[in-house]
Amino acid sequence: MDSFIKISNFSKIAPYAELFWQGLLVTVLLSLFTVVIGFCLALVLALMRMSNVRPFRFLGIDREGHQRERGVLVAISKFNPLDFLATAYVEILRSTPVIVQIFIIYFGVFGIIQLPNFQVFGFIKFSRFFPGVVALGMNSGAYLCEIIRAGIQSIDGGQTEAARSLGLSRTQNLRYIILPQALKNILPAIANEFVVIIKESAITYTIGVQDIMSAVNAVKGATFVIIEPLLVATAIYFCLCFPTSKLIAYFERRMSHGDKR
């Protein structure tokens, strides 16, 4: 196997250009679906973390009806199961390697749940693509959760009071007033997460997803050339991520100018 860069090796991998185009399409689709799933999951997690559900609130009140100041009962009365579950999920997913999560989802979850074995566009194996999307989406949701929560909390509390004075419910206030403004603030961060997912999606080739790195692996096995396919993959990732990052920065500047007005 060649370990040095040779111009002649690029002609050897040229017949496999279609594999890289297919890998490019899979990578883009994988990233898009991952961000959508991650955002929906993150929104639910953020609302859970911001909830005020305390089923044992009554334990913090003594027999005379006064609020207890300290003790075990006070700690239990402040327990929020929704916040606990969401926090545990975020901390676990952010503290473990992505490849471990992918293997658990693919071999553990979808080893039990049998997915239909068909191909999308004639080459994307659904039984491998879908577990990759789920695993990356779950991981992305853990990171986007904090971004969304920070965006919601950045909205002035006076707007919530104004919404209440107009007779809007908490759901209506969140849907029509808080979320639209929060999304505007966090849109650049969500777009940047898309760029991160493009790069992180390379790990899914370990479960057979036909992304760019899978194309590299296939070309390496067929031609015994490794450096040149890696350089092609590097160029493809760069052409995906660099323009996207610059486009995000451009829109971020435009949005900040609008706020200054």
Image (cartoon, helix red, strand yellow):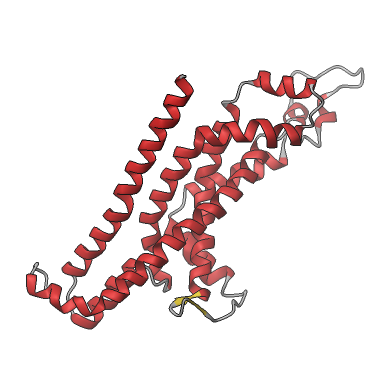
> Is residue 70 visible to the viewer in this orientation of the structure?
no
Does any portion of residue 182 appear in the rendered image? yes
Q: Quadrant of the N terminus?
A: bottom left
Give the image location of residue 166, x and y in percent.
79, 23
* Residue 52, placed above or below residue 32: above
Who's the residue at 32% across and 55% down the image?
240
Is 245 in front, or is 112?
Answer: 245
Question: Of residues 217 and 168, which is closer to you in this image?
Answer: 168
Q: Position of residue 161 (x, y in %)?
A: 73, 20
Numbered marks: total: 0
Where is residue 164? Give x, y as percent.
Answer: 78, 23
Question: Which quadrant of the structure image shows residue 3?
Answer: bottom left
243 or 52, which is in the foreground? 243
Residue 209 lies left or right of residue 178; in this view the side is left
Residue drawn 36% across the image and 37% down it: 249
For the view shown, which residue lies furthest in the right direction? Answer: 64
Q: Which residue lies at the image location 57% right of the left edge and 72% below the top edge?
A: 110
Q: Is residue 71 left or right of residue 99?
A: right
Q: State the image quarter where residue 225 is shown.
A: bottom left
Reply above or below: 192 against 149: below
Q: Kindly identify the residue that appears in the image at 59 percent across and 28 percent down.
A: 153
Which of the 4 quarters of the picture holds residue 223? bottom left
Foreground residue among 177 and 70: 177
* Residue 22 x/y as whole percent: 36, 72
Image side of residue 47 versus residue 21, left or right: right
- On screen, residue 77 versus residue 240, left or right, reads right
